[in-house]
Amino acid sequence: EFEAHARKGIGKDHAKWSPVATASYRLMPSIEIVKPIYDELAEELVNWMEPGVFKLEEADEVDHRVKAVVVNPYACTMSRNFMRNPALKESIKMSRIPNHFIFSVESVGMMEPAVIVAEALKVLKNKAGNLSGLTYEAEEMNE
């Protein structure tokens, strides 16, 4: 014998009904090499400091074998490990682009992340419309 009870709910009522596992954002990193980084220092940067952000290319200069170049700033975690090495600290300028956001939304399976984002944008649009209407009414009352 088996008896079961179910209750429908939404995330607005309680987090246990929320279809999102994790949602976060970060600003897009901006990485600029201000002084060329060559040979052993370049290998250290590429392999140990920021894996996936930089790559080695053949150096144009006769005195050097390879140089480091920025290949994927998106992969940067902004750890700033390179600052432990004084030569690298002087060679790299790292910042964030203030109006470029990287969003990450994970789902637990009930809804696809793209659907979650679309629904959230609909809610945000409705709230913005409500706020706009309230401000319009307040202006009308003050006149």
Image: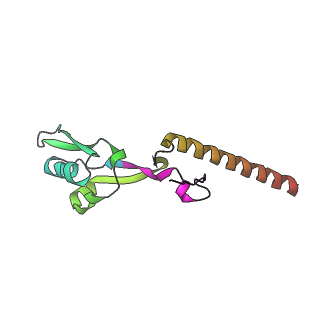
Would residue 63 appear left or right of 15 to someone viewing this image? left
Q: Position of residue 43 (x, y in %)?
A: 17, 48
Q: Which residues are magenta?
A: 1-30
Give the image's coloring scheme.
Answer: rainbow
Q: Residue at x 86, y 57 (%)?
A: 142
Where is the C terminus found, in terms of image quarters?
bottom right
In the image, what residue occupies the spot 35% across and 55% down?
Answer: 78
On whether residue 119 falls in the magenta region, the answer is no
> Magenta stretch: residue 6 in it?
yes
Quick check: 16 left or right of 33? right
Q: Identify the residue at image location x=22%, y=48%.
A: 46
Q: Nearer the viewer, residue 75 or 1?
A: 1
Identify which residue, 74 or 42, lies in the foreground: 74
Locate residue 83, reporting x and y percent.
27, 60
- Between residues 87 and 128, which one lies in front from this camera angle? 128
Q: How many marks?
A: 0
Residue 61 in picture, x, y percent from top left: 15, 39
Q: Residue at x 54, y 40 (%)?
A: 115
